[in-house]
Amino acid sequence: METLLISNLRKGLVERKIVVRAFRVWEATNPSKNNELISMECALVDVEGDTIQATIRKFDVPRFKSIIRENELYSLSRFIVVEATKKYRAVPNKKMIEIQKSTIVECLRSCEFEIPLHVFNFQKFSMIKDQLPNDELLIDVIGYIVGIGPMEEVNLKNRIGHKRNMELQDSENEKITLTLWEEYGYGINMDDIIDKSRTEFVVAIFCGMTKKVMCTTSATKCYIDEDFPEVTKFKSSLKELPQCVVELASKEVPVMTLAQQKSANRCTIDELLSLDPNEHQGQRFTCNAKVVNIDNIKGWWYTACKTCGMGMKKYDSKLWCTNCWNSNKSVAMYKINFIVQDDTNMANFIMFSNVADEFIGISARDLISYLEPETEEIPALLTECIGREEIFQVGFDRRAVGGLRRSFVVSKIFPSVATFPKISTSESGQSSKQLSYLDFESQTSEEVNTRDETELKEESYINVDINRSSSAAGVQKEKKQKTKYFYHIENNYVCVYIYIYIYIYYLIFIHIYICFS
């Protein structure tokens, strides 16, 4: 069978073979969910030097993990070509290969053509600085190390992270700073690099870096002073003499207690609106404000990818995640645009499911199951949030940066009002739990620090509409009882009919016996 080239691939099922080298292989993971596996990814190159990314879905990874290895040659057939993801592509090709269970993957010991071992898409440092931040395509960089910092511990959304900063310089004397997270930072031998830099340039290649903040991802590969043709060529372009790598000052931020987080970077709404989002992107602020309304122009929930939480779009009558390219694995998630107010101004605070599930007390999926189909009204559980005053931890909404309307994304809520749960009886005689809050104000910082995360979650406000859920459960119970009742009635009727038929046959038999005897 004649082989295809990557440049000849068209969308849809491909039965014919392509011969490629897997020059980069990695597992895409979600760091915010304890590095949960999303998919297995491969960057492939053919004899023409053209590249394409291949993806293997999470549940197919065990089948191919031991087969597909980095730098090996492969023959692929019976795969699907689809549109590439909109973000974090490792290669420029706007199409990608989806490897499925039916895909035939054959490892080749040799090939009659020479296929490159490595492919890099280096960008000049000056171009990276001039271009608008865009994570559609991950970038590759090459430069010699001029500075390296120690490992630092930093506060992330739901965990403690570890990173190391590194400064590179290119042949045009432009510098950029890279952030190396977790194993990429720990994998750097700082002392060895500093010692080696006293006599020669230490050249580093980093592949699969994000352009917005120049940091490592699960797709990143790091090569320090490897014997690559690209490294030799880069060293020959350098004109100045080697300089010893300097140790960068630590920018370590101490881990904050809950009480410290609650008051950190406290701002009024007016102060938040006056900040430049480009200068403060990634920073978090706290703000004491009251919910006064809900902006429901774009709805209060969206169809999200079950794997990564990103929005899904419809292609060819199927829902596809434009981030991890999973299909039809969707779930309803909150995206509530609360209008909040304090003594200085008003602003839009957007709340997603990671915070809203706890704030509302029920997931978007479960709440929708209680509502009438295709209803556009805001549920009562959401409108009941109006009037609540909380301390919100927020950051700038990246999608709204540069727009006329500035909004903020809520990353955490610290309750500021103290009431205890109470049970009230409605007119129908059913009990319903009222919205409850916990008073953290009366506790000292020492008491807050001794509480574990589980206790705080259990004590946080829970808002579950027991009337609605109990009535739904009652309907189900009533249906089951009715079904059981009619089942017994039907069984009784069947028994009666059987006895009647037996009795009739018995009489006929006796009559025939008497006649012939």
Image (cartoon, rainbow, N blue to C red):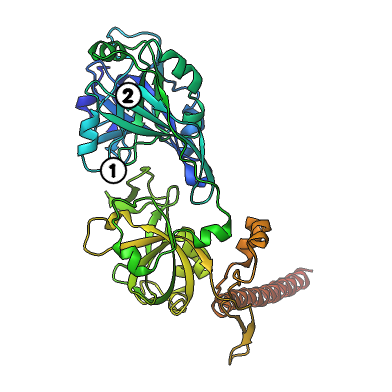
Q: Amino acid at mark 1?
A: Lys
Q: Classify 10 Å Cα crowding around label 2: few (below 14), some (14-19), many (20 and above).
A: many
Q: Does residue 395 show up?
A: yes
Q: Amino acid at mark 2?
A: Leu
Marked residue nearer the N-terminal end (1 or 2): 2
Quadrant in which the C terminus is drawn: bottom right
Quadrant in which the N terminus is drawn: top left
Say the numbered circle drawn on residue 86.
Answer: 1
Farthest residue to the bottom: give it.
427
Q: What number of labels is visible?
A: 2
Q: Is residue 198 left or right of residue 322?
A: right
Q: Nearer the viewer, residue 244 or 236?
A: 244
Which x, y percent locates residue 190? 48, 23
Which x, y percent locates residue 407? 32, 63
Residue position for label 2: 44
Q: Does residue 10 show up?
A: no
Which residue appears at 30% of the width and 25% of the height?
Answer: 169
Which x, y percent locates residue 115? 29, 13
Q: Is residue 199 left or right of residue 473?
A: left
Which element is circle 1 on?
loop
Q: Nearer the viewer, residue 236 or 291?
A: 236
Q: Classify 10 Å Cα crowding around label 1: few (below 14), some (14-19), many (20 and above).
A: some
Say the numbered circle drawn on residue 364.
Answer: none
Q: Nearer the viewer, residue 195 or 329?
A: 195
Which element is circle 2 on?
strand
Q: Is residue 417 left or right of residue 420?
A: left
Cα distance, mark 1 to mark 2? 18 Å
Which x, y percent locates residue 486? 63, 77
- Residue 437's quadrant in the figure? bottom right
Q: Is residue 265 above or below residue 140?
A: below
Q: Nearer the viewer, residue 377 or 131?
A: 131
Q: Is residue 410 above or below residue 109?
A: below
